[in-house]
Image (cartoon, grey):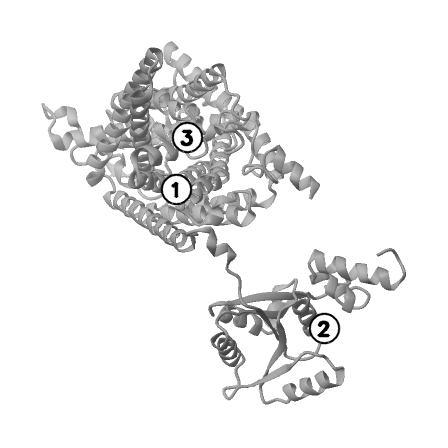
Amino acid sequence: MRDTADRGRRGRLGAGPSAWAPAGASWSRSWAGAAALSVTAYVPDAVLAAAAAAAGAAASGLATGAVLVCVVLLLLVAVSYRQTAREGQGVGDLGYGVVASSLGTWPGLVTAAALLTCHALALAVCTATAASYLAVTVPRLAPATVQVAAVGAAALGLAVLGADRQVGRGLSRLARVCVPAYAVVLGAVVVAGLAQDLTGSLGRADSAVLEVLPETGGQHGQQGLPSLAALLPVMGVLVSGSAVLTGVGPVFGGGCLRGDRPGSGPDGSRRGGRDTAQDTRRDTVSGLVLLATGAALVVVIVYLAGTVGARVVEDPAGQLLRDDLPVGEGYHQLPASVQVARAVFADAPLVPFLVVVTTVAVMLLVGATVLTRLPVLAAVLGRDHLLPHRMCQPGDRRVRLWCAAMAWLGAVVLLVVARGSVARLLPPYVLTTSVYLTLVQVGMMRHWSYGLARATDPRARQRMRRSRALNAAGAAATGTVLVGLLSTWPTRDAWIVLAVLALLAAVCLIMRVTSLYYRRVSAETSLNGLQDVEVLPAQVRAVVLASRFHQLTVRALTYARSTHPASVEVLTVDMGDGSAERLVETWEEAGVAVPLTVLGSPTLEVVPPVVSYIRSLRSDAPQDLVVVFLPEHLVSHWWERVLLSSTTTRLGAAMRRVPGVVVASVPWRLATPGQPGRGGPGGQGAAGGVEDVMDADVAARRASRRRRGQGGPG
């Protein structure tokens, strides 16, 4: 008790909510770097594919311009979104808290649903991207992208659940190796490619000999003034480029840069609230540098892909032509970064291989971090009664298992629906990201407006106005992306976007129903006054269930008598097999001074007559409290539960529905073969079994009487 009290005074009992998760400054920087650089694996392909659909072979300039515009939007959104974490509003919840507190219930529900869906989409995108890069080295895996991605997601979930802190240290070491290696390899490709481009020695991609067949409405520059139908594909290119925004939340949200643990300090910071402006500026600069590095790599890869003539389309079998004929299903399209690496290092095949290996490692690392951060978000939502309350314990293994299972199931469904195509998964990914980023920015605007209404210091008011203007610009940027995506969805796999919108609505409805249920339970169980505490039952009556006279019955009877009830009786049911008669004879021979009641059962069932008898006790004395003691076996293996009777479980479930009845379980631990159990010879005799189930006061009184009987000090 002293240790528990001391720990309680020091702060909180047990480990922190994120003690099981990888933490620390090195891990946080590595994870933020992986999240920022992961966009280089799938954004160039998405932009080039959308540009090819809009402009055919003349897609290089369109793709590069679209990426540059999206990079400007990325930096604007990153600076504005960073204010959420700086103000302590987005630590651990990715900005959900500020939306719920500033905008109300339904915007908070939409934000929470978007964040949960975004985690499943992130896992699906990461594993699908890793599978597509893995198919570069193992071409036989190309037709089985969905299966490989699903197995990869399951392996990540098992790895995260498998070793707790050991897997955290392993992921930290992997991140410290893979993220710098990926940056170095990709940086070498980019620098060498730009140098060769300046000197005119840059080679051509293997796919440069192919021709691209644009979709209907393409070649927007060849028909005079572009019409609205021709502008939609161009808008689609911008929307594809805006996938770089998917790295903003993971880098800045949830205290990623400092490894903050929600709840460990007054403002959610890891150091108990002793945060400084210098640390905040350092985090902002670090996040911006990481995001800018990833965005710059995306721009250069898109530019070099256009320079080397790399062909990347959504449907290679139908859109790529060789000698005016489609290449067919046998053609395997390589990712843009791999095509650029092969063109730049044509004589060094090791470099493209390293690009593939490091990309797979980084994508799997990001997928693992999605699974480790999801329970923290679920804990925040459980605290606000939007998810089951058991989610409030992110360190619980079952909670992590539930979160990993739900994320895996959602990712598998999305992979099957999108047929493993990253290009089909990106629009809903960008949609959910834009939804919650826009709501967070609007919530921060309302937050600053509230602050302006209360602040009187001119400097503080000026800072709040600047912050509100910055958040307004960020909201305009993400809102533009959202509007652009919704305007182009009829031309780009509309059914996937509609399915994700329906999923968002369903998640919102489920969380709303959950919140209303908890509100109803709270209203029903709340105290109207302290007078309810003084209400006591007239007397307590104990009923012990018994099937035969054995140690389980003795233990339950002893436990019942130790509670000092007004009356105790033993109850059994006559099943017509003679067991009741044998129990009565044994009971009389033992001379137990407790009445034994035998119930008849015409239908040869146990539960109905027992429940009927307990109800009759309640009807005879409504002011009394009836405590039913159920002896049961405590087993170690699942097959033992199958062999032993489940009558006790059904009796407990049935009697818990009777008002004024308390069910007390009295367990008997069965010995494991080869090991002495708590019950059995030498370990579970009458006295030992009683002391196992006695409370501390009763055990102390018995020990005192035993000492007095032996002549010891009383």
Mark positioned earlier in the residue sequence (3 or 1): 3
- Between 203 and 509, the one nearer to me in the picture: 509
- Label drawn at residue 116: 1
Left or right relative to 173: residue 3: right
Residue 221: where, in percent of width, then height?
Answer: 15, 24
Question: Could you tell me which quadrant the N terminus lies in?
Answer: top right
Kind of residue indicated by mark 2: Gln
Is 669 rendered above or below residue 575? above
Label 3 sits on a secondary structure element that is loop
Choose top left, top right, bottom left or bottom right for residue 581. bottom right
> Mark 2 packing: few (<14 Cα in 10 Å), some, or many (20+)?
some
Q: Mark 2 — residue?
A: 551
Residue 316 visible somewhere in the drawing: no
- Between 677 and 70, the one nearer to me in the picture: 677
Identify the residue at image location x=35%, y=46%: 419
Q: Kindly report which numbered mark, 2 or 1, lies closer to the viewer in this rendering.
A: 2
